[in-house]
Image (spheres, rainbow, N blue to C red):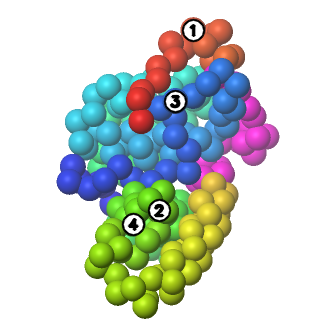
Amino acid sequence: MPWTADQATPFVPSDFCNLDPTSILKPMDLVTIGADLAWMLDVKREDLAGWYRTLGLALFERFGLTRLPQRPAFADAVQGADLMRALGAVDIPDWSNGLGRAWAFREHLLALPSHVSGVLEGHPFQLSVSHQEMPPPLRPMAEDVADHMLKHSGAAKEIARKLDWTIIGLWGCPLERLELKVTVAELAASGLEIQTFEP
């Protein structure tokens, strides 16, 4: 399940590289932050990994989740594969492994809306990276298919967010804390040094 350096940045439902003071974070954001941190460790992006690790640890603290077993993995992991295993992701989860299956479903849902799907003139789901490779009579059909893929990927993102909620619950987050919220401004006021990165 870990990503390799020659792959594009994995698609994520949320981007935590350019947060503004009004951005709202919830416990379920730890799922995306953890998956992103694993990728950043694998591709040796120390700058991004440092920020995501710091942000994740701040959320564990803020939401009173420091006793969850995933918290030490956030703090200490140096290999993406090790972190993903600690977060509950496995290559082939068995039928009784609800956490592993939730991660697997999440991976499948986010496989379609990925950066490697191709980008052409702002449309993320063109069937061909270059229109020159698509026969002119087929272009309208290809554009229609791409539009439908875009709608499908939007639905996949929404379901993935629900899976994030499920995953954090399966980690052991108390149900009454799943809907807690914090703004970036509040995190900064409590001492978190906010970092931003150019896209």
Pointer 3 with pointer 2, Cβ within 8 A: no
Q: Given the image, on which type of amino acid does mark 3 rest? A: Asn
Residue 104: tell me if it is visible: no
Pointer 4 with pointer 2, Cβ within 8 A: yes
Residue at x-position 49% and y-position 62%: 123
Residue 124: which disc? 2
Q: Which residue is mark 3?
A: 18
Q: Which residue is mark 4?
A: 117
**Mark 3 and mark 2: Cα distance apart in space:** 21 Å
Q: Earlier in the sequence, mark 4 or mark 2?
A: 4
Frontmost residue, 57 versus 139: 139
Q: Quadrant of residue 3?
A: bottom left
**Mark 3 and mark 4: Cα distance apart in space:** 23 Å
Q: Earlier in the sequence, mark 1 or mark 3?
A: 3
Rendered-image quadrant of the C terminus: top left
Q: Nearer the viewer, mark 1 or mark 2?
A: 2
Q: Which residues are magenta?
A: 164-184
**Mark 1 and mark 2: Cα distance apart in space:** 38 Å
Residue 129: which disc? none
Q: Given the image, on which type of amino acid does mark 2 rest? A: Pro
Pointer 3 with pointer 4, Cβ within 8 A: no
Q: Quadrant of residue 20?
A: top right
The extreme bottom residue here reads 137
Find residue 131 and report its horizontal and vertical position in percent: 35, 74
Query: Could you classify mark 3 by the number of other residues whose Cα lies within 10 Å: few (under 14), some (14-19), or many (20 or more)?
Result: few
Query: Could you classify mark 1 by the number of other residues whose Cα lies within 10 Å: few (under 14), some (14-19), or many (20 or more)?
Result: few
